[in-house]
Every structure is written in structure tokens, then in C-alpha cells.
Image: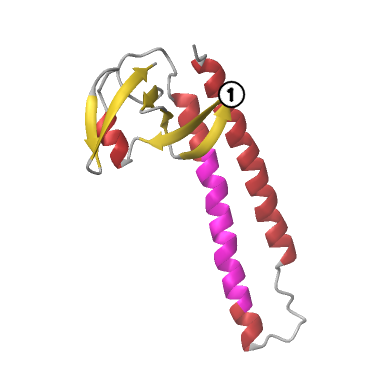
Amino acid sequence: MINKQKLKEHLISLEDDSIKSSEEQYQGFLDGNRLKYDEVRSPDDQARHKTNVDLTVKLGDLVHEHQQHRKILENIPFEPTEVVKPGAIVSVNGRCFVIAFYKSPFEFEGREFMGISTNAPLYQCLEGKEAGDEFTFNNKDYLIESVI
């Protein structure tokens, strides 16, 4: 049986690692791409600077996204449940999903999991269902094998 609290701690750890990595990338990019005012600024320099500013904003957004994911994890109770809701772990046709936010596949205790957001169309099909329920998504039929 999966220890949901340990899974939650694992997800928080993954997000902490992502926050740290994203912050380092953000800071490294800032440090390496500051426009020096004593340099000649050609149209190419200005275009490169504009691209760098755009990338810096995207890297900053990534940091904030991981920080938001961490807050979500802190606020979702990962308590036992029989219905699909935030904090549930759902097995569907052999795949395990954690209901919280999108998270690319990750491994925990030898099993592969994937996070799905409560905004995802798949979640809309799963919400409130229980083990043994069936649903159709993208013209395919699925069976909910377990909900914990």
C-alpha cells in the first residue's frame, strides 16, 4: 500500500529541487546576459537583449510555477479517500495519477506516477468517481482500478 504522506513529502522534495534548479538557471541567465552600457549597441545587440529579457521572464515564471506547486501540495490533504478529488491517488488502466497539478512522470517506491491538474480534461472525467467506475475519455473507455 502506498504511504500517501511519504508520497506528498516526495512531491514536495521534487518541487524544492525544481525551485532551486530554476532559481539557479534564472540567476545564471541574468548574470550572463546583462547589457553593458559601455559597449556599442548595434541592432543585433538590441535584438539579442530583447530575446534575453523574454527568456528571463520565462525563467522567472518557471520559478513561480514551482513555488505555486509547492503551496498546492502543502494545502492539499493527502488523506485516505474513496472518491477522486485533490490529493487522491488514482489507478486507471494500470497508470497511477496524483491529483494535484500537472507533473511529468516520476518514480516513487518503484512505481511510476504522473500528476494531473484539477483543470485537466481527464480530471473532469474522474472527479467524484470511485474504484470500479468506468468512464470515456477521447473516445476510449477506462476503468478506475483504485482510489486511495
Circle 1 SS class: loop
Q: Quadrant of residue 45?
A: bottom right
Residue underneath mark 1: 110
Q: Relative to the observer, which residue lies in front, 128 or 130?
A: 130
Query: Residue 146 location, x and y as percent?
Result: 36, 18
Query: Residue 44 location, x and y as percent?
Result: 63, 85
Magenta stretch holds residue 57: yes
Query: Measured along the vertical axis of the image, is residue 16 above or below residue 148?
Result: below
Query: Measured along the vertical axis of the image, is residue 106 above or below residue 85?
Result: below
Q: Relative to the observer, which residue lies in front, 35 or 147?
A: 147
**How many numbered badges does the structure rendering display?**
1
Tell me the quarter of the image containing the C terminus.
top left
127 with respect to 3 (left or right): left
Q: Relative to the observer, which residue lies in front, 70 or 123?
A: 123
Start-end of magenta stretch:
48-67
* Point 25% across, 44% down: residue: 138
Query: Residue 123 location, x and y as percent?
Result: 31, 34
